[in-house]
């Protein structure tokens, strides 16, 4: 049994050798079979066949993940959601999702971002940066959308919505329960 295992291991290693490799095989006085790339007294030279070559088709590059400018972007060259990625699974026990935006040029003074989770506005207080955290998001499939509003509440830019999946192991385990809000 030991010899079978050794022979299998050697054959496996021989399969990884380049096609131009020379291998020598001999049996010692105890009956053990040995293989080497160096000649040994009484060794027999083995000629290995060249392994088959497999050609794979070229890999197409994925489309750019940079958010596209929406038709409704007055004064903003780009506005989009870059995190979470489309179709991403967010794994977070208390249900926190970090949402990041790409805004070019930077958010103008007085403008604000309004975030929509599953079509409903999310209270983000006075969000004026390019990141927001959503808390206690339930398990399942969700869609995040966002708009930039000017001081008068008019929408000046709209981000394409992003669908993501919230994964929470269990809210029934005490350590995984979200913190209580006061």
Image (tube, rainbow, N blue to C red):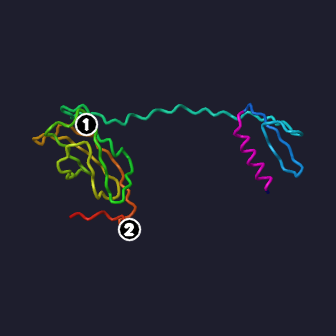
* Residue depicted at 77% across the width and 50% down the height: 6
> Label 1: how many residues lie within 10 Å, few (<14), some (14-19) or many (20+)?
many
Picture quarter with the C terminus: bottom left
Percent x, y of residue 66: 34, 35
* Residue depicted at 82% across the width and 37% down the height: 46
Relative horizontal placement of residue 182, taking residue 44 as reference (left or right)? left
Which of 103 and 120 lies nearest the eye of the viewer? 103
> Label 2: how many residues lie within 10 Å, few (<14), some (14-19) or many (20+)?
few
| Residue identifier under label 1 | 103
> In terms of image quadrants, where is residue 62?
top left
Disc on the earlier residue, 2 or 1? 1
Q: Is residue 14 magenta?
A: yes
Percent x, y of residue 79: 26, 37
Q: What range is drawn magenta here?
A: 2-18
Q: Secondary structure at mark 1?
A: strand
| Residue identifier under label 2 | 173
Give the dominant element type of the magenta stretch: helix, strand or loop: helix
Picture quarter with the N terminus: bottom right
């Amino acid at each position: 049994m030991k010899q079978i295992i050794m022979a299998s291991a050697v054959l496996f290693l021989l399969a990884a050798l380049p096609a131009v490799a020379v291998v020598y095989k001999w049996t010692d006085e105890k009956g053990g079979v040995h293989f080497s790339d160096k000649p040994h007294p009484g060794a027999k030279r083995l000629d290995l066949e060249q392994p088959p070559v497999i050609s794979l088709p070229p890999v197409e590059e994925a489309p750019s993940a940079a958010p596209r400018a929406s038709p409704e972007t007055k004064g903003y060259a780009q506005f989009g959601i870059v995190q979470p990625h489309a179709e991403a699974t967010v794994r977070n026990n208390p249900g926190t999702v970090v949402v990041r935006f790409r805004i070019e040029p930077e958010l103008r003074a007085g403008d604000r971002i309004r975030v929509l989770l599953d079509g409903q506005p999310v209270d983000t207080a006075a969000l004026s940066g390019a990141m927001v955290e959503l808390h206690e998001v339930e398990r399942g499939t969700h869609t995040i959308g966002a708009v930039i509003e000017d001081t008068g509440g008019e929408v000046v830019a709209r981000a394409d919505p992003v669908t993501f999946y919230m994964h929470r192991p269990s809210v029934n385990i005490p350590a995984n329960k979200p913190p209580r809000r006061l």
